[in-house]
Amino acid sequence: MTALPSTAKVSLARTQLEVKEFFREREQLIFTFFFPIIFLGIFAAVFSSTDFGGGVTAATYFTPGMIASGIFLTSFQSLAVTIAIERDQDVLKRLRGTPMSAQAYFAGKIGLVLTTSIMQFTLLLLIAGLLLDVDLPTSPAKWLNFLWIFVLGTASGSVLGIAFSVVPRSGKAASAVVTPIVLLLQFISGVYFVYSSLPGWMRTVSEIFPLKWLAQGMRSVFLPDGFEAVEPGGSWQLGTGAIVLSVWLVVGLVIAQRVFRWTRRDAG
């Protein structure tokens, strides 16, 4: 008998398939992949005359938020919507009946998130640096911070997206359920506005959720050190951010294991 391929090999093949399917969907490309890049260009033009202090341009100030938003879109929103659609169309049910393990399926989803997130922020930084005159960090310490913030952000966003995929009652309702939540978090987490200018109660609410800490962590990487004093807490609070993102990662894993369904609700 021919031996079945290893889980690692199947996971890699599944990742390649997920990436191909992602880039074939125009809606996902526009609203998930290119959305932060388009908005960065718009914000850079609209706020071109705004003085953010310290010689920081609008493009520079909004770059961290757009990177954080892109990570959240390609992880939480993308997985919550696509998995809900796959469940509604019985794709998950059919996959569950194949020799492919559940681990390979989820590894493929995580591989998709990592691949698209890396491609997205790379393209965004190229555009920001070459076309919008954004000065990118040169300090190895800042890029090291970027690495762990990116890993924690994509990991927590991915497991939360998998867990949240059970909330929409149908595939058609998935975007209508998930997108408003993501937009709300973007508005209160310092993605579209100067975070310190938001009302205190709004900042308090945002501190519960991972996007705020992801955006603040990215600001610590791409903004001058002097901007640390402008933050409401007077610092970048990287330690607190790491704890919050890690807690959401654990919570997402526990919830996903308990509530994830391979079949539609009406299937029993």
Image (cartoon, helix red, strand yellow):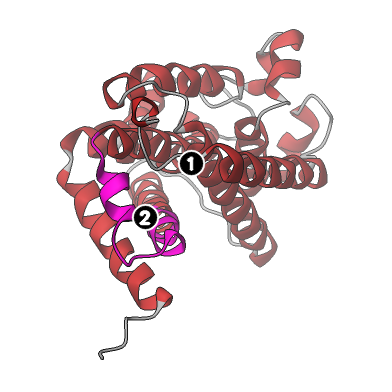
Q: Residues within 10 Å of mark 1 (few under 14, many from 20)?
A: many
Label ID, residue 112: 2
Q: Is residue 237 left or right of residue 173?
A: right
Nearer to us of marks 1 and 2 is 1
Name the element at disc 2: helix
Residue 251 location (% of width, % of height)? 69, 40
Q: Residue at x 55, y 38 (%)?
A: 160
- Looking at the image, is mark 1 or mark 2 earlier in the sequence? 2
Q: Amino acid at mark 2?
A: Leu
Name the element at disc 1: helix
Residue 11 among magenta residues: no
Q: Residue at x 39, y 44 (%)?
A: 128
Task: Inspect this view and state whether residue 54 appears.
Answer: no
Give me the C-alpha separation between circle 1 and circle 2: 13 Å
- Magenta region, residue range: 89-112
In terms of image quadrants, where is residue 220?
A: top right
Q: How many marks?
A: 2
Q: Residue at x 30, y 63 (%)?
A: 14
Pick the residue in front: 250 or 43. Answer: 250
Q: Residue at x 68, y 36 (%)?
A: 213
Q: Is residue 86 left or right of residue 215?
A: left
Task: Inspect this view and state whether residue 96 appears.
Answer: yes
Q: Amino acid at mark 1?
A: Ile
Residue 174 location (% of width, % of height)? 35, 24
Label ID, residue 162: 1
Residue 219 location (% of width, % of height)? 63, 40
Pick the residue in front: 264 or 236. Answer: 264
Label ID, residue 12: none
Pick the residue in front: 121 or 131. Answer: 121
